Image (cartoon, rainbow, N blue to C red):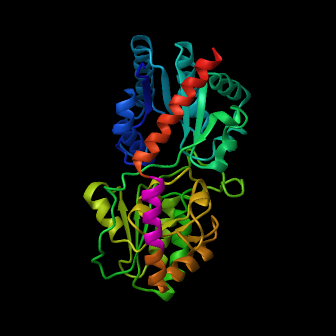
Amino acid sequence: MKIPHILFIGPLPPPYSGPEISMQLFLESEILQKNCRLLFLRTNFRKDNVHKGKIDAAGIWFTLRYFLRLLRLLLFHRPDLVYYPITPTQVGWIGRDAPTLLLCRLFGAGAVIHERGSHFKLNYGKFSNWARFLVKQAFKGVYAGIVQADYLHEEFSDFLPPERIYTLYQAIDTEKYRPEPQTHTNMNLLFVGHLTKAKGYCDLLRAMPEVWQRFPNVHLYCAGNIRRGERGVFFNQYDGSPLTYEDPEIAEREFLEKTVPGDRYVNLGIITGKHKMEIFQNADIFVSPSYSEGFSRALLEAMSLGKAIVYTPVGAHEEIMKNGRNGLRVLPGDWHALAAALIHLLVDPEARRTMGRVNRDDAVARFDIAGISEQLLRIFQESMDRERGAR
């Protein structure tokens, strides 16, 4: 049986964000390497999240070279299938997604697209008529669409039949992310992600004064870039309401001036490697108060490392997390409830330990890279078989 040629198109680290790390895990997967010939085309050249999505001369030049490389791969390697994570924005679809998918279709390579967020459909409703036409044409070459939770199937329901829409959860190497005994004496809260309104960073800052009234010695560690502007998230995914922009730099400045007791808040910036692992291992509670997610990789890392979690019911989190079992659930934007949930877990160390054990078990059983790679391989095989049967 002919080994299929699969062209993976997407980002690689740095930056060390979910899409980049997930692509690296798939390319390094022994299961995929054994059953496919893997080709790769990189879509990112910026080394940090601050400038991701920025339109400038360097970005335009890289895009031109990207399409030349894509043409060469399609012409000389003739891949059987293309795996491609899409962007959620009109600019992304016009500038790269639609032309990429149309070129693949032109050379006879069907695409499996992967939405790693959760707001393509909401954004699509605001696209121009021309952009919508382009998107619809691009979907004609799509064999399958992947989302990160079952309830997100509606993201592609206007473009693909139900049997061609799949759920693929976030993946992690659970052997690498193993819990270790804690050695710290402080109570530590950890937030990891873009330091933006959309990720709930500003709400977390508002919640902390209430936490410090009860626990003045708690430390809050925030890891990630402060990112001004919302380049991809414009809606509260929980209720569909427009997201009101808030400048995170101003929010942090006011927070530092008014409310922080001593050195209890630390902005870590970007953390990677051994330093990142140490920060995660020393956390008592992981906080994910986001307004919109697909499946947060940082949350999955916290699960694999056995942490209790305070989370919002967005993206896959509502589906994979059970309130009171894996952590405590709060609604996006309700910072009083966020403070109350953090206080509840700080008061109850046994609840934290129990939730941590459950999260570790769930990560190993449901989200390890080996199992997720097998599922992705099955999606590839079913997509190609379906297409051959239609010819």
Q: Is residue 364 magenta?
A: yes
Rendered location of residue 202, percent (x, y): 54, 65
| x 36%, y 51%: residue | 173
Is residue 353 at least partly visible in the picture? yes
| x 71%, y 53%: residue | 240
Rendered location of residue 48, percent (x, y): 38, 45
Quarter residue 292 falls in: bottom right
Rendered location of residue 101, percent (x, y): 56, 23
Picture layout, residue 48 above or below residue 4? below
Location of the C terminus by quadrant is top right
Q: Read off the magenta span.
A: 355-367
Quarter residue 331 falls in: bottom right
Picture layout, residue 2 above or below residue 153? above
Left or right, residue 69 beside residue 162: left
Left or right, residue 240 beside residue 305: right
| x 35%, y 42%: residue | 13
Rendered location of residue 377, percent (x, y): 47, 35
Q: Is residue 381 magenta?
A: no
The secondary structure that most of the magenta stretch takes on is: helix
